[in-house]
């Protein structure tokens, strides 16, 4: 498979950081739903197209800035188009790993949409925006970080399968490679 240019990979990979897990009691209000959904993916987002379990498509992502700086945060936004209702509440798992294997994995697992809109409340046709930050610790020896992600159901310890695995970069274990992001030295 041919890889997109480095600028596209950079823009699509800063997916870790601090994720605040907050749950709205009794489900999302209409105002919270409006804040957590979009009608159109912003034009600067990186297109993806990964189909997760036939339920959701990751249609795009943004990473700002497009280069990780140790000791600073990068903001990541994911855009999920809902294809089918989901009965379970999945977490978004995010693994940031040194492409050369010289640094420890950074996990940024979190509830979607800041905890305001669990996946069991996602409606077909909606596009749900999920935002979080990733943080690379100072002194990280990595030159490039891989950002892996997917949807994980903790009760059964299962991931939604990537239906179109031949069309997107993945590890064959339910982890989608969002991109590779360079690390400032």
Image (spheres, grey):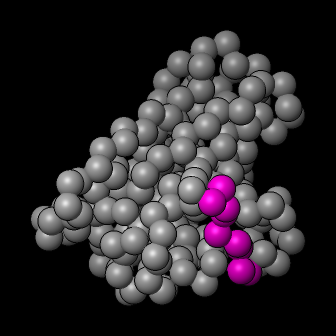
19 to the left or right of 98 = left
Displayed quadrant of residue 184: top right
86 to the left or right of 104 = left
168 to the left or right of 33 = right
Residue at left offset 54%, top offset 44%: 109
Residue at left offset 53%, top offset 29%: 135
Magenta stretch: includes residue 125: no
Q: In the current view of this chain or complex, which residue is farthest to the top? A: 139
Task: Report if residue 9 is visible in the image.
Answer: no
| Residue 140 position in % (x across, y down) | 70, 19
| Residue 47 position in % (x across, y down) | 57, 70
Depicted 141 relative to depicted 51: above or below: above
Residue at left offset 64%, top offset 69%: 160
Of the 4 image quadrants, the one containing the N terminus is bottom right
| Residue 101 position in % (x across, y down) | 85, 32
Q: Specify start and end residues of the magenta stretch as a single range.
A: 156-164
Magenta stretch secondary structure, dominant: loop
Displayed quadrant of residue 116: bottom left
171 to the left or right of 9 = right
Depicted 64 relative to depicted 125: above or below: above
Of the 4 image quadrants, the one containing the C terminus is top right
């Amino acid at each position: 498979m041919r890889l997109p240019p480095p600028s596209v990979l950079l823009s699509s990979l800063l997916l870790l950081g601090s994720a605040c897990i907050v749950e709205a009691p009794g489900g999302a209000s209409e105002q919270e739903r409006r804040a957590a959904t979009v009608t159109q993916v912003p034009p600067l987002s990186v297109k993806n197209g990964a189909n997760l379990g036939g339920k959701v498509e990751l249609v795009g992502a943004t990473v700002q800035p497009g280069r990780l700086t140790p000791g600073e945060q990068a903001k990541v936004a994911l855009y999920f188009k809902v294809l089918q209702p989901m009965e379970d509440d999945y977490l978004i798992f995010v693994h940031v790993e040194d492409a050369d294997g010289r640094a420890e994995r950074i996990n940024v697992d979190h509830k979607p949409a800041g905890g305001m809109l669990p996946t069991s409340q996602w409606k077909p046709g909606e596009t749900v925006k999920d935002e979080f930050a990733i943080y690379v610790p100072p002194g990280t020896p990595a030159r490039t970080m891989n950002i892996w992600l997917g949807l994980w159901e903790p009760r059964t310890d299962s991931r939604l399968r990537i239906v179109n695995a031949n069309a997107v970069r993945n590890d064959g274990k339910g982890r989608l490679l969002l991109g590779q992001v360079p690390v400032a030295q």
